[in-house]
Image (cartoon, rainbow, N blue to C red):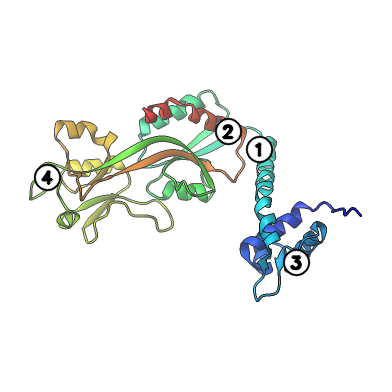
């Protein structure tokens, strides 16, 4: 006797996936914006169509059976493929964009980055480039909130919502003006020794509370909107702080700024990337820009 199995629907599979991930019918219903009975009916129908018991209902909380765990694991590839297919269909339905929104972060070499965008948009006159400059956590917030199509800054590479193109590694160096410190500017300075000196920091443009970089607890601070203003304040001996090395290379060579990087104030190396959302569709011009950045001289220079 041969058993036959009815084909299950994408809706049923999505309901089972949401249930497996949230652990309850109510939570799965809220995640999918469907009713509790609809999710329950879909999972029950899926079990009947597969001829498998996917759920262990004997305990206080619903759990997956061994067969349910195995089926759920295999289903992830199918769901991912379908999600990608849906995004691709949305991209095909898009016409050329009237505008692309790009956010440039505070640690970018702005001239080189803007020159790269200018080269691309000269051949795409029908699409206007809207550029915004943000600092610290601001660029990533704009990307996650849907206010930017692409950012050039740093991102959390472990976040599955984003994809990125590596551009360059940006060293940050703690610097002071000559005579700013009441002791010799050397490489053995500890953070506690800097507590009595004003520290200049970049003002975070994120609407939500962002991350602090390089700050000394208890130190007096002054905040500025960008790295160029920060550099000027440090050059005038009004504060000290960390700056991108590309911005102060000449000053370090001529001695108008002194590095105090060492064992206790090591600075850092930040990864500059071009990033976009991986879970949202991108129009044809946005995709062309992404491909252009992948092969751009900017990235080649960053790797050299």
Binning the other alpha carbons within 10 Å of mark 4 as few (below 14), some (14 to 19) or many (20 upward) gives some
Q: CA distance from mark 2 to mark 3?
A: 40 Å
Quadrant where the N terminus is found in the figure: bottom right
Comes first in the chain, label 1 or label 2: 1
Q: What element does badge 3 sit on?
A: helix
Binning the other alpha carbons within 10 Å of mark 1 as few (below 14), some (14 to 19) or many (20 upward) gives some
Q: CA distance from mark 3 to mark 1?
A: 33 Å
| Farthest residue, direction bottom | 60
Which mark is in front, 4 or 3?
A: 3
Where does label 1 land, which residue? Answer: 91
Q: Pick whichever, 147 or 71, lies toward us.
A: 71
**Is 111 situated above or below 161?**
above
Q: Pick whichever, 129 or 61, lies toward us.
A: 61
Quadrant where the C terminus is found in the figure: top left
Question: On the picture, is 262 further left or further right than 206?
Answer: left
Q: CA distance from mark 4 to mark 2?
A: 49 Å
Which mark is in front, 2 or 3?
A: 3
Q: Are marks 1 and 4 in contact (CB under 8 Å)?
A: no
> Is residue 32 visible to us here?
no
Where does label 4 land, which residue? Answer: 185
* Residue 204 placement (x, y as % from top left): 36, 51
Where does label 3 land, which residue? Answer: 40
Comes first in the chain, label 1 or label 4: 1
């Amino acid at each position: 006797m041969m058993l036959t199995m009815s084909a299950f629907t994408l809706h049923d599979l999505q309901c089972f996936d949401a249930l497996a991930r949230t652990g309850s019918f109510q939570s799965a219903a809220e995640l999918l914006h469907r009713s509790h009975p609809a999710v329950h009916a879909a999972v029950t129908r899926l079990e009947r169509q597969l001829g498998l018991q996917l759920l262990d209902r004997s305990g206080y909380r619903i759990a997956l059976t061994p067969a349910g765990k195995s089926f759920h694991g295999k289903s992830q590839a199918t769901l991912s493929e379908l999600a990608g297919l849906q995004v691709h269909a949305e991209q095909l339905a898009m016409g050329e964009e009237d505008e692309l929104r790009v956010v440039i972060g505070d640690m970018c070499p702005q001239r080189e980055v803007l020159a790269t965008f200018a080269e691309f948009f000269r051949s795409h006159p029908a699409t206007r480039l809207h550029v915004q400059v943000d600092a610290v956590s601001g660029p990533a917030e704009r990307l996650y909130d849907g206010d930017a199509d692409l950012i050039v800054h740093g991102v959390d590479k472990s976040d599955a919502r984003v994809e990125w193109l590596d551009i360059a590694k940006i060293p940050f160096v703690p610097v002071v003006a000559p005579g700013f410190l009441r002791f010799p500017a050397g490489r053995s300075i500890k953070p506690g020794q800097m507590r009595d000196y004003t520290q200049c920091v970049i003002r975070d443009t994120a609407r939500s509370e962002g991350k602090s970089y390089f700050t000394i607890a208890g130190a007096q601070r002054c905040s500025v909107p960008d790295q160029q203003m920060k550099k000027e304040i440090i050059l005038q001996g009004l504060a000290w702080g960390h700056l991108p090395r590309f911005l102060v290379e000449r000053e370090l060579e001529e001695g108008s700024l002194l590095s105090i990087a060492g064992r206790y104030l090591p600075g850092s190396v930040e990864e500059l990337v071009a990033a976009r959302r991986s879970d949202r569709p991108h129009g044809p011009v946005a995709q062309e820009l992404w491909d252009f950045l992948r092969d751009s001289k900017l990235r080649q220079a960053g790797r050299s």
